[in-house]
Amino acid sequence: MKNTRKKILIVDDSKVVRSMVKKALDECQEIDADLIFTESYAQTQEIVQKHRFHIAILDVTLPDAQNGEVIDLLTEQDVPVVVLTGGISNASKNIILKKNIMEYITKSNPQSLDYIVTIAKRILKNYDAHVLIIDASKSLRLLTKLSLEKLNLCVLEAKSAKEAIEILRTSEQYIPLVITDYSLPDMDGMELTMELRQIYSKDKLSIIALSGSNDPIIASKFLRHGANDFIKKPYTHEEFSLRINVNLELIDLFRQSKETASKDFLTGLYNRRFFFESGIPILEKTKRKSLSIAVATIDIDFFKKINDTYGHDIGDVAIKEVANILKKHLRSSDLIARFGGEEFCILLDDISEEKALNKFEDIRAAFESNILSVSGATISYTVSIGLYYGNACSLEDMLTLADKALYEAKETGRNKVIIHKKS
């Protein structure tokens, strides 16, 4: 189910309800999924055979299935189910709540649509979220893993503190949550928590501690030493699920807040500060692997003339078009930032000199052939590109060399790519 476009199934015999749910989900920019609708049990049976769904939002009572049969149909396919219903008897409600559903929401609740969006976001995000379990016991790790997989999370395992630290250090995947038992063979969970906090702040890594100890102050000790949360064993699946989702949600909020502060308001690209913060670990990885790296600076040619001739509003459009063209030609792993005005910087690792040159020549040519029609005006412009390629040194030094190449491109006619190399 990973790396596929996600699908949400909405089952309700009311066209009004289907439209309202669709509108609420469509308006949420964080939900990027295909919405598929059915209005009967028979239709749902047919559609489930054709698609694999990541979440289902279901009404309990359908014209051809009055007793919640549609819930069993989806849960048997391991699809997370959110029940949205207009109201049922207490006896029926108790039966439904015993089924393996994620949430139960009544349509009469004024906040029901907002709540559906919140739940859908969390469930969809979980498919891409990685969680690390640290427990010396293989059987207990398995139990925790099964609980996490019910939340559709990607689970990594470690049997010791040392192994956990190595996984966090070397994993290509972002791991926002660690769940550690108190008893570990090489150091206890509290010592591991303290060590992890020397590396990862609470807004980057959430740590949940588990313990079956009856010591009344062990929870406060864990929290004081850096854990985000503590769960006493044994625990119910409902409690465990709630704590996991709440901690993941908080990490998401921290990331969103930081991302907002790291983005350029006009283009949506990263800003100068983020470029330097994120560039450092990329450089360190490149140095460890003894690989070459490319740093480019891009500048719009005669940008002042665009502003003077057409006005600053069209100048802003020209700047935003730079972001559009760069995104089309660069990899998702490449670090792109607007440094200010009409200047942009790009950091590329794991790329050969030939491919870097060809890539930026393609970008230069894309600008040369691009024509913008804005507010009745037709404009075109070129860019000059300075490129550094070679061994990783400091970001400042590499940018200085890229800027020298850019200056040379400007001085020798513009609309060209100049490279400075260092081996």
Image: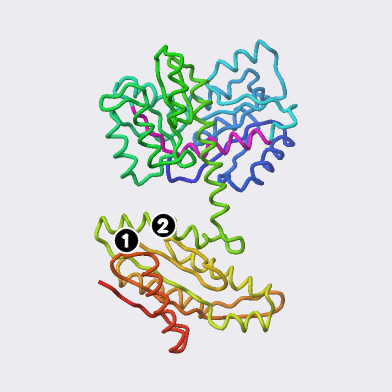
Instruction: Tell whether 42 sits left or right of 52.
Output: right
Taking the spot 42% from the left edge, 11% from the top edge, the residue there is 214
Vertical arrangement, residue 242 with respect to residue 309, above or below:
above
**Residue 360 on the magenta span:** no
Provide the secondary structure element on which disc 1 rests: loop
Q: Main secondary structure of the magenta part?
A: helix
Q: Do the residues labelled 1 and 2 touch (CB within 8 Å)?
A: yes
Q: Which of 252 and 156 is in front in this view?
A: 252
Q: How is the image coloured?
A: rainbow
Question: In the image, what residue type sits under mark 2?
Answer: Ser
Q: Earlier in the sequence, mark 1 or mark 2?
A: 2
On the image, numbered disc 2 is attached to which residue? 333
Instruction: Magenta stretch: give its range.
Output: 114-134
Provide the secondary structure element on which disc 2 rests: loop
Taking the spot 52% from the left edge, 31% from the top edge, the residue there is 245
Res 42 → quadrant: top right
**Residue 116 on the magenta span:** yes
- Point out the image quarter for the N terminus: top left
Q: Nearer the viewer, residue 206 or 346?
A: 206
Q: Position of residue 209 (x, y in %)?
A: 42, 25
- Point out the image quarter for the C terminus: bottom left
Taking the spot 27% from the left edge, 62% from the top edge, the residue there is 291
Q: Position of residue 284 (x, y in %)?
A: 32, 56
Q: Position of residue 324 (x, y in %)?
A: 54, 66
Question: In the image, what residue type sits under mark 1?
Answer: Asp
Vertical arrangement, residue 85 with respect to residue 18, above or below:
above
On residue 350, the disc is 1
Q: Position of residue 151 (x, y in %)?
A: 48, 29
